[in-house]
Amino acid sequence: MERRNSKKIKLGNTFIGGDSHILVQSMLNIPASDIEGSVSQAKELAAAGCQVIRFAIPNEDALALIEPIKEAVSVPLVADIHFDYRLALGAAERGIDKIRINPGNIGDDSRVKAVADACRKKNIPIRIGVNSGSLEKDILARYGSPTPEAMVESALYHAALLEKFDFNDIVISIKSSNVQTMISAYELAAEKCDYPLHLGVTEAGTERMGIIKSSIGIGSLLAKGIGDTIRVSLTDKPVKEVFAAFDILKALGLKNDSPYLISCPTCGRTKIDLVSLAKQVEEKLKDCKKPIKVAVMGCVVNGPGEAREADIGIAGGDGSGLIFKKGEILRKVDEKDLLNELMKEIDKL
């Protein structure tokens, strides 16, 4: 698919926008005072493949998080700051890779200039984050509600404050808990500026509904070529956000460096425990880095035929199953051996 032509911005040891890969972001949810716990969670996220890690800097003491996390992981780090420009300056001084702050909320021009100058000096991009609950009073009054148009106007207002001081390494996010509002806002922003866009549905909910809303919102935009970084926001463990985000990218063909599992929903023809088997295969493939399509099918009717594009797969029989490769049957094996035999074939690929 053709992606929107956005500005390319350096972020630590990688890039956002332009021809760069779409980056997956998550956020620590450990109290900022718990440095050891924050470092541990950052390492877990990095091990899961998270490509950008954000954490809150609610006060000056929290600046002490930056160095230990930077020492523990090589993933670019984002300091999430609200209102206090001195925290942004402190984060820049301590080596943060990116700052999330809204310039219109930190005071007069001198403060905005101080942050812009500090970030420019150290090549630190700034992410402007607007959501439906953070609109300026005059904008909200003019539009009557947090419409897509209102949120985009707010984001561009904050960007203009930085542009005023010749700062253009800007990333924009315009989130809403309403999926349709979020989609419309990002579509409008994509038309009005060339800054990279960080996609997300804010306050998406717990794992089940959060993944559904994020998949619709983020997926719809990515399918149109809009979006440079993404976060699936869940009221759950942050590492689950990373797995969900990668699954969205896989489903759209935007991530091709790991296995892609397909499996049938089962029906009355199924005579093996396919549900359990599919889950076991999924778990076994979690750390696999091969760009292969693996099929777990319930019967020979929908096995080698329907899943003939799979690099390797299994099709259930009556207490047994077929191992097939690109639609061609390799052999028949007992049900209890299906998982091991499948993994042996995957190891050969």
Image (tube, rainbow, N blue to C red):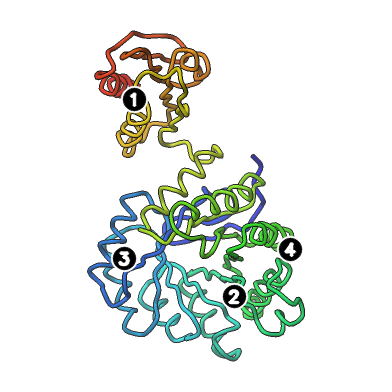
Residue at mark 1 to residue at mark 3: CA–CA distance: 46 Å
Residue 75 locus on image (x, y percent): 37, 58
Kindly indicate whether the residue at mark 3 contacts the one at mark 1 (C-beta within 8 angstroms). Answer: no
Quarter-of-image position of residue 323 = top left
Q: Which residue is mark 4?
A: 192
Crowd band around label 3 with a 10 angstrom C-alpha radius: few (<14), some (14–19), many (20+) = some
Please tell me how crowded label 1 is: few (under 14), some (14-19), or many (20+) other residues with Cα within 10 Å: few
Identify the residue shown where x is 66% and y is 80%: 164
Circles 1, 4 touching at the beta carbon (< 8 Å): no
Cα distance between the residues tagged 2 and 1: 47 Å
Q: Which mark is residue 273?
A: 1
Residue at 47 percent of width and 26 percent of height: 264
Secondary element at tag 2:
loop
What's the CA distance linking mark 1 and mark 4? 52 Å
Amino acid type at image mark 1: Asp
> Mark 4 or mark 2, which is nearer to you?
2
The label shown at residue 28 is none
Give the side of residue 336 with respect to residue 228, left or right: left
In percent of width and height, residue 153 lies at: 71, 73
Badge 3 vs badge 2, beta-carbon distance below 8 Å = no
